[in-house]
Image (spheres, rainbow, N blue to C red):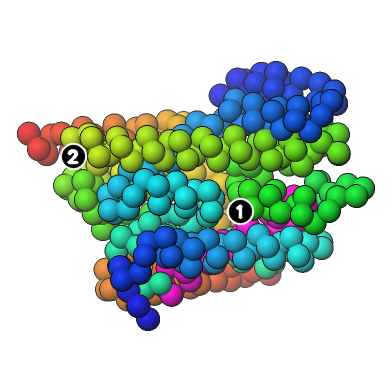
Amino acid sequence: MRLTWRYVTKRAMSNPSTFTSSAHAFYAGVRSALTSVFFLVLMGTYIGMGALAHDFGLSPWWFALSTLLVWAAPAQVILVTAVGAGATLFEAALAVTLSGIRLFPMVVALLPLLRGEGTRLRDLLLPTHFTSVSMWVESLRLLPAVPRERRIAFCNGLSVGYMGTAATFGFVGFYLAAGLPPLFAGTLLFLTPMSFLISTARNARMLVDRVALVLGLVLGTLLTYFQVELDLMWTGVVGGTLAYVVHRLREAVA
Amino acid sequence: MSAIGELSPYLVLILAGYLPNEIWRVLGLVLARGLNEDSEIVIWSRAVATAILAGVIAKLILFSSGALANIPLSVRVGAAVCGFLVFLLLKRSVFAGVLVGEAVLLLGGYLFVH
């Protein structure tokens, strides 16, 4: 995978300094999205989530709109399951906003790379909305090689490539789930929890993240089983804070 | 507090999905001055987000609905555990882990039905 990635990057990014126009940079961004490893990741994730939307009785257009507006897979899964399970509006919004806090530092880290002489606030509105894990990781990696005056266009192209991929495969997943026999539809539905479990574990670089993952699995199960209200909010706040305390205690000892 | 079912799903999408999520991006744009990846508040917020996501994962696997609920709980848990172990054993490959988890689920589900 790594070899292909490097090869693909090299091709897509051939002479980024020669982007003659913003359109050219935008197009290069789209192309580098469609040839990056995140294309496959988004494909699998959104097929699973499209199937999930079908399972919870939502329309494929509703799900596509959630991809364009929310543009964060975890928040979308929370929203779909909350709507499907008949949670209150307040409960769903609370869980979504807690899952979204992580976007704040991502935007903060990304914008300095995009800002240049004469960049207006409104030029940064789209990249701000587009900020999500896939786009962020790739932007931080690729942007330094792009001339500063073309970076926003490149970044927007990259994001449009990713968002288009996600929206398209959301539809694919939805209609696959609608048409497949139950066993295969069940397998599609399993794609979301399985891939999220593993990718979260993979992204957990620090002890605090691993502890939070384990505590979240345990607390989420217990609170759902005992039908505690606002279960996701408590899972996040209690599990996350306990994990953070473990991290601080360990640092204090070291 | 109104149950979500009574509202238009598109209104719910805006109120419970778009706005509570987008607020953090907008705050990042407005307050974008020096906050590094390793600051304590960032570490805490990442832990909270991870725990919430883990809670959703547990719910989807253990308290499944629809087509996935037809596959027995033991098969679902077994598949998740197998997939995770393969991920750990095979150089932390997400792809291999997901593939094995799915294969175990399919096989277990098939054997259960027949």
Q: Amino acid at mark 1?
A: Met
Q: Is residue A61 visible?
A: yes
Q: Chain of mark 2?
A: A
Crowding around mark 1 (Cα neighbors within 10 Å: few <14, some 14 to 19, many 20+) is few
Point out the tag, 1 or 2, that comes first from the N-terminus: 2
Q: Read off the residue under disc 1.
A: A206
Q: Which residues are magenta?
A: A90-111
Tell me which corner region of the image, top left, top right, bottom left or bottom right, holds residue A155: top right
Residue in front for this viewpoint, B8 or A37: B8
Which element is circle 1 on?
A: loop
Badge 2 marks a residue whose secondary structure is helix
- Write the residue at 32% across / 74% down: B3
Amino acid type, callout 2: Pro
Residue at 40% across, 72% down: A89
- Foreground of the two, A103 or A215: A103
* Circles 1 and 2: CB atoms closer than 8 Å: no
Residue at 60% from the left image edge and 47% from the top image edge:
A133
Residue B55 seen by the camera: no
Q: Is residue A208 left or right of residue A107?
A: left
Residue with the mark numbered 2: A182
Question: Would you place residue A169 above or below residue A212 in this image?
Answer: above
Chain identifier of the residue bearing label 1 in the image: A
Counting from the top left corner in percent of width and height, residue A69 is at 53, 53
Give x and y (percent) for residue B67: 21, 46
